Image (cartoon, rainbow, N blue to C red):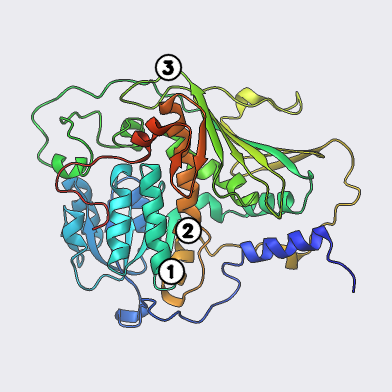
């Protein structure tokens, strides 16, 4: 019998890793279905309906929108005007008490994502959550473990819509097919510098349209300031509300090497950047994770840059300064440079020995990120960014913030969720919440 070639082995791995949408599967026992909903549609509660919430609401608008929730009365009124039959709420905890909800779309501020996710899953609801799933390493682990306890009964998806693109699929195939050989490192970057600064001073009065106490949710108390509510770029650089660009854009950009290299948990992480500010994410940061070898690849280093620094380019033809974001894979045979919409392979030699894939070898095209999740809710088919995959990705990324705040390289023990050489890092792994707020509720 002819032994299996490394190329055919990689091809089989690609097919097994990206088979979403290739066909329907039998509905698992206990999986919530839309069979009892009008027109066989899901009954969906949308929590957070402004900004990305409005976009996610639009992505599921053809289902039954039965509940809307937002701490901003203006956003809530606008959404209610589009879906007048939906019940409206300010407090998401009360929203989740509504009896006819099949599924939840969460697009709140980052520091409440994990809470909504866990509470909804504990009630047997399917969940689509805007990235990131959580605001700390510990929260990401709790979200992932809650999903795994309910796997086969609920469908989940993190809102990293770039994952559904054809371009990302082609990059994954090229890397796994070995076009640049064994990958030695992967670098991702984004140029979104934001000045580190202290929490804002109090401004009164609090506008009548905002429930400030619910906006704060589980975070430590901070006085109202108009500089917080609104776009994520206003609040996500403050440690109590977000984790800067590594938590935000890191979900999109780190997703590609995480997927292509089949990464899970690193064994070491270190970070450098502008001086640590106690209240907010640094203006510049560089993070390095070390991943052990697996059956599919050797050990690999993955790096993240934001706020200005970028990796070196393999050719002078690439204008590094013009690339505001991107991913660069470095392999033994060359490089692969990519962004959301393009990919370029640069080889040290020709492509002799490279076996061009056939149509049957390709990762199937996505139905669309929201549609993938909706189909999974109704049929039990898989999603590509379920909370197992995306929970591990977010946990991985946010470990970079822990390393930066700790000020030293971390020898990471993922099984214990702790740095064996730095016990003081634990204060940044797990958050403390305001009285009355419970993560696993």
175 relative to 282, above or below: below
Tags 1 and 2 in contact by the CB under 8 Å rule?
Answer: yes
Tags 3 and 2 in contact by the CB under 8 Å rule?
Answer: no
Instruction: Say which residue label 2 marks.
Output: 388
437 relative to 382, above or below: above
Which dot marks residue 275? Answer: 3
Which dot marks residue 168? Answer: none
Q: Is residue 186 left or right of residue 279?
A: right
**Position in image of residue 58 (x %, y %):** 37, 57
Whichever of labels 3 and 2 marks the residue nearer the N terminus, that label is 3
Q: What is the secondary structure assignment of the residue under circle 3?
A: loop
* Quarter of the C terminus within the rendering: bottom left
Q: Which of 351/58 is in front?
A: 351
Rendered residue at 45%/52% (across/down): 391
122 relative to 318, above or below: below
Task: Identify the image quadrant of residue 290.
Answer: top right
Q: Which of 274/18 is in front?
A: 274
Q: CA distance from mark 1 to mark 3?
A: 42 Å
Instruction: Say which residue label 1 marks.
Output: 151
Q: What is the secondary structure assignment of the residue under circle 1?
A: loop
């Amino acid at each position: 019998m002819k032994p299996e070639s490394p190329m055919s082995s990689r091809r089989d791995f690609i097919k097994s890793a990206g088979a979403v949408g290739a066909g329907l599967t039998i509905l698992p026992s206990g999986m919530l279905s839309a069979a009892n909903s009008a027109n066989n549609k899901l009954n969906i509660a949308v929590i957070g309906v402004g900004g990305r919430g409005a976009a996610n609401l639009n992505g599921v608008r053809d289902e039954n929108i039965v509940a809307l929730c937002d701490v901003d009365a203006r956003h809530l009124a606008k959404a209610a005007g589009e879906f007048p039959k939906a019940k409206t709420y300010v407090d998401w905890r009360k929203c989740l008490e509504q009896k006819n909800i099949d599924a939840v779309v969460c697009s709140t501020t980052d520091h409440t994502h994990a809470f909504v996710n866990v509470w909804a899953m504990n009630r047997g609801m399917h969940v689509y959550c805007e990235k990131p799933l959580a605001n700390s390493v510990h929260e990401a682990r709790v979200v992932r473990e809650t999903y795994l306890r309910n796997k086969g009964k609920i469908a989940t998806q993190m809102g990293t819509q770039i994952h559904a693109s054809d371009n990302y699929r082609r990059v994954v195939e090229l890397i796994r097919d070995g076009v640049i050989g064994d990958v030695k490192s992967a670098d991702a970057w984004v140029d979104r510098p934001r000045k580190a600064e202290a929490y804002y001073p109090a401004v009164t009065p609090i506008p009548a349209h905002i429930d400030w106490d619910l906006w704060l949710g589980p975070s430590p108390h901070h006085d109202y300031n108009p500089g917080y509510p609104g776009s994520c770029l206003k609040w996500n650089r403050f440690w109590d509300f977000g984790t800067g660009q590594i938590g935000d854009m890191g979900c999109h950009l780190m997703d590609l090497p995480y997927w292509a290299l089949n990464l899970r948990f690193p064994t070491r992480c270190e970070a450098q950047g502008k001086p640590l500010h106690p209240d907010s994410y640094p203006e510049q940061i560089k993070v390095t994770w070390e991943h052990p070898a697996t059956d599919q690849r050797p050990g690999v280093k993955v790096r993240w840059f934001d706020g200005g620094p970028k990796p070196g380019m393999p050719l002078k033809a690439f204008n590094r300064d013009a690339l505001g974001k991107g991913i660069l894979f470095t392999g033994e045979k060359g490089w692969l440079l990519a962004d959301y919409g393009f990919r370029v392979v640069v080889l040290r030699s020709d492509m002799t020995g490279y076996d061009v894939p056939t149509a049957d070898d390709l990762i199937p095209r996505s139905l669309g990120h929201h549609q993938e999740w909706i189909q999974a809710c109704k049929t039990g088919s898989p999603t590509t960014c379920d909370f197992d995959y995306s929970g591990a990705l977010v946990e991985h990324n946010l470990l970079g913030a822990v390393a930066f705040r700790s000020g030293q390289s971390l020898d990471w023990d993922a099984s214990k969720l702790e740095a064996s050489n730095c016990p003081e890092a634990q204060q940044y792994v797990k958050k403390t919440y305001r009285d009355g707020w419970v993560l696993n509720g």
